Image (cartoon, rainbow, N blue to C red):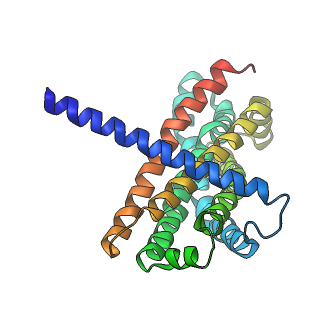
């Protein structure tokens, strides 16, 4: 019992200390972001734009492919159950609502956490190992302002855009399967989809994606800045960044869904 209590207390302390470090890092990023509206060159624009291209444009193909696949599979699985009740025409409604509410932001966040979050942790971790971050500090450049803030801001801007792409592509994939493979009339499919989809589904999905983007960027940058040692430490930090990001995404998604659909009015 003593050993169990000790391990439990140690785990709780580790989690709380990690939350505190993320909070401090996020507060610093918010401060630099707000300062950039009043002072020029607080956040380096070349780094920001390069990260936006990497996160947004270079990731469009992979998130579109995953979104289309999920929309197709969702339509087939929904039709399998709805056909039993004679409600095959509502396949489009289920696909559109599911993509906008949950699957769109969740899929985009998980794909980006694996593609971009790992890259952020590896880049910053390598800079820590090669003492490039120490060189920035020696030159009077704050590493949070130069390295972390542009990445967080770029991801916060691009992930909602990628979520919209995933939503649209997933809905198109469901429509293609519904009209060609399931024999649903195209006009009926679109009409039922628009009828079921409401504005709340769209803006709550975008709100979730914005929250996910902050979590991914902060966790990845924090893991990168925590690296000490050699290449093995960089690999460990990269793995931890992806795992922690995905776990937090799922937990926060559960909490956000409960708050949005049970506490907030329709």
In the rendered picture of this protein, how many numbered marks are placed on residues? 0
| Image: 178 above or below 81 | below
| Residue at the image position 38 percent from the left and 69 percent from the top | 234
Is residue 107 among the parts visible in the rendering? no
| Quarter assignment of residue 227 | bottom left
Residue 19, image x, y percentages: 48, 42
What residue occupies the far right of the structure in this picture? 38
In percent of the image, x 61 and y 55: which residue is there?
68
Q: Looking at the image, is 2 positioned above or below residue 241?
A: above
Residue at image location 59% in from the left, 43% down from the top: 103
Residue 136 coordinates in the image, percent (x, y): 57, 76
Query: Where is residue 94, by image quadrant?
Result: top right
> Where is the C terminus found, in terms of image quarters?
top right
- Quadrant assignment for the N terminus: top left
- Give the residue at x 69% y 51%: 30
Q: Position of residue 148 (x, y in %)?
A: 60, 63
How far from the left and from the top, in percent, is residue 21? Answer: 49, 48
Q: Is residue 130 above or below residue 152?
A: below
Q: Is residue 32 left or right of residue 108?
A: right
* Res. 17 in view: yes
């Amino acid at each position: 019992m003593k050993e169990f209590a000790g391990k439990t207390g140690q785990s709780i302390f580790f989690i709380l200390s990690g939350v505190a470090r993320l909070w401090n890092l996020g507060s610093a990023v918010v401060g630099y972001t707000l300062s950039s509206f009043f002072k020029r060159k607080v956040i380096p624009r070349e780094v920001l734009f390069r990260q936006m291209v990497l996160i947004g444009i270079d990731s469009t193909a992979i998130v579109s492919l995953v979104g289309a696949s999920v929309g197709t599979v969702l339509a087939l699985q929904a039709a399998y159950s709805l056909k039993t009740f004679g409600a095959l025409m509502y396949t489009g409604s289920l696909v559109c609502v599911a993509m906008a509410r949950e699957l769109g932001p969740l899929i985009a966040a998980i794909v980006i956490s694996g593609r971009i979050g790992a890259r952020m942790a590896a880049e910053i971790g390598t800079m820590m190992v090669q003492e490039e971050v120490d060189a920035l500090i020696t030159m009077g450049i704050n590493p949070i302002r130069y390295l972390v803030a542009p990445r967080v801001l770029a991801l916060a801007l691009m992930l909602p855009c990628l979520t919209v792409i995933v939503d649209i592509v997933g809905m198109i994939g469901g429509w293609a399967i519904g009209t060609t493979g399931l024999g649903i009339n195209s006009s009926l499919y679109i009409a039922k989809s628009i009828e079921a989809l409401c504005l709340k589904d769209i803006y709550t999905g975008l709100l979730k994606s914005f929250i996910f983007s902050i979590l991914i960027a902060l966790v990845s940058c924090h893991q990168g800045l925590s690296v000490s040692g050699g290449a093995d430490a960089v690999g460990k930090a990269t793995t931890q960044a992806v795992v922690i990001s995905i776990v937090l995404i799922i937990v926060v998604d559960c909490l956000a869904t409960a708050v949005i659909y049970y506490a907030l009015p329709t």
